């Protein structure tokens, strides 16, 4: 794909996206590879104008490519509208020949690696609380701007080790939403972080992000997480082994959606495990917050805004 340099290119559904001149990449010096994303390599670069380290997603296109992947366009269009201390900053979008460079602020590692590094010792409960508070602040801001992330998981949360700052990243599946909500695609999120309403193919809203954050909260506490299903049916079976199924009056359509999903597979008719037993070490207020985030019924699930006011965060609420 050829993109006019130093231009504002208008994409259907995504609006005008400004690309910097290819010469803009001359201000950055490549240092080393960081990893590989869904659409290209990620590198550590140095900004020669100020000495700061940045992360660069390098997306290449072959002759047969029809254009930028929608996920890349979506990430650019969403991030250009967001400005919050707990959301990764997109610093530059550079077009050069058959490549697009997305320049981000650099953070040390993702939350998945942080959890892995603490697999033996565990994570300090105060660090868990601070991380969760920041994640919820970022999510609350996104929702206030009518943005659903739809793929929250430890790999998509970046950590600065020195300041213990956490930032939401990877907005490739994000989208804006309106009220009333249309029926969105269910092909979102990584399986173990998918909310019940997504698994069931039902209408969903911003509370899908809250379910994902609840799963992340549990993973920080346990280091292995609550769920590990290999399919939608096995994951739903695990969920129903912990949480009771809402009734039809509270959540219309759910009692017919469950058997349709599970088909011939058996699933618990009532819970046979207790949440508190699965997150040992989490205090009473933390368990209460987690249970509100992992409420089966999305209409009764706590919002990010209200979660920030929960007593679990009473010693942090001056930092809102």
Image (tube, rainbow, N blue to C red):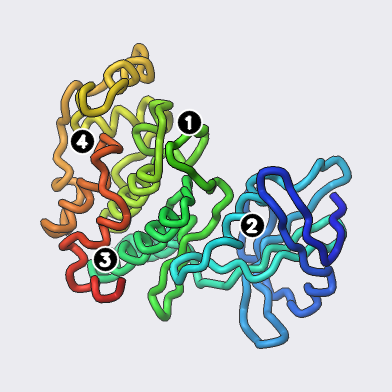
Q: Are marks 3 and 1 in contact (CB under 8 Å)?
A: no
The outermost residue toward the bottom is: 50
Distance from Cα at disc 3 to Cα at disc 4? 23 Å
Which image quadrant for residue 49? bottom right
The outermost residue toward the top is: 264
- Which residue is drawn at the image coordinates 48% and 33% (left, top)? 182
Say left or right for 40 vs 248.
right
Residue that badge 1 annotates: 183
Q: Are marks 3 and 4 in contact (CB under 8 Å)?
A: no
- Which residue is drawn at the image coordinates 83% and 68% (left, top)? 22
User: How far across and down, in percent of the image, does residue 146 sit?
Assistant: 46, 51
Label 4: few (<14), some (14–19) or many (≥20) C-alpha neighbours in 10 Å = some
Distance from Cα at disc 4 to Cα at disc 1? 27 Å
Circle 1 sits in a helix, a strand or a loop, which is it? Answer: loop
Circle 3 sits in a helix, a strand or a loop, which is it? Answer: helix
User: Which callout, 2 or 1, points at the residue further toward the start of the chain?
Assistant: 2
Residue that badge 2 annotates: 76
Distance from Cα at disc 2 to Cα at disc 3? 30 Å
Circle 2 sits in a helix, a strand or a loop, which is it? Answer: helix
Nearer the viewer's eye, disc 2 or disc 1?
Answer: 1
Distance from Cα at disc 2 to Cα at disc 4? 38 Å
Distance from Cα at disc 3 to Cα at disc 1? 34 Å
Label 3: few (<14), some (14–19) or many (≥20) C-alpha neighbours in 10 Å = some
Label disc, if present, on residue 103 of the rendered structure: none
- Which residue is drawn at the image coordinates 40% and 79% (left, top)? 163
User: How far across and down, in percent of the image, does residue 211 sit?
Assistant: 33, 45
User: How far across and down, in percent of the image, does residue 126 sit?
Assistant: 24, 70
Residue that badge 4 annotates: 242
- Which residue is drawn at the image coordinates 40% and 35% (left, top)? 204
Nearer the viewer's eye, disc 4 or disc 1?
Answer: 1
Nearer the viewer's eye, disc 3 or disc 1?
Answer: 1
Residue that badge 3 annotates: 129
């Amino acid at each position: 794909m050829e993109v006019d340099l130093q231009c504002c290119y208008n994409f259907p559904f995504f609006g005008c996206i400004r690309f910097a001149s290819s010469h803009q990449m001359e201000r950055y010096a490549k240092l080393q590879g960081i990893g590989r994303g869904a659409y290209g390599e990620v590198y550590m670069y140095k900004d020669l104008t100020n000495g700061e380290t940045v992360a660069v997603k390098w997306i290449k296109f072959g002759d047969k490519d029809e254009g930028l992947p929608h996920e890349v366009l979506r990430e650019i269009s969403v991030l250009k509208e967001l400005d919050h201390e707990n959301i990764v900053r997109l610093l530059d979008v550079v077009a050069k020949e058959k490549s697009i460079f997305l320049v981000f602020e650099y953070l040390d590692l993702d939350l998945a690696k942080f959890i892995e590094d603490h697999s033996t010792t565990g994570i300090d409960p105060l660090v868990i609380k601070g991380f969760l508070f920041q994640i919820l602040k970022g999510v609350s801001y996104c929702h206030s701007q009518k943005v659903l992330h739809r793929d929250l998981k430890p790999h998509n949360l970046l950590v600065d080790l020195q300041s213990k700052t956490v930032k939401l990243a990877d907005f490739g599946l994000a989208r804006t939403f309106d009220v009333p909500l249309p029926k969105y695609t269910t092909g979102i999120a990584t399986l173990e972080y998918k909310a019940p309403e997504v698994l069931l193919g039902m209408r969903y809203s911003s509370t899908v992000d809250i379910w994902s954050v609840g799963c992340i909260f549990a993973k920080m506490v346990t280091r292995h997480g609550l769920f590990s299903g290999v399919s939608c049916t096995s994951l739903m079976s695990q969920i129903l082994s912990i949480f009771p199924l809402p009734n039809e009056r509270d959540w219309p359509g759910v009692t017919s959606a469950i058997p349709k999903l599970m088909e011939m597979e058996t699933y618990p008719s009532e819970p046979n495990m207790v949440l508190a037993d699965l997150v040992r070490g989490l205090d009473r207020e933390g368990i209460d917050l987690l249970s509100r985030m992992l409420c089966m019924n999305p209409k009764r699930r706590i919002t990010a805004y209200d979660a920030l006011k929960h007593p679990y965060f009473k010693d942090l609420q001056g930092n809102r």
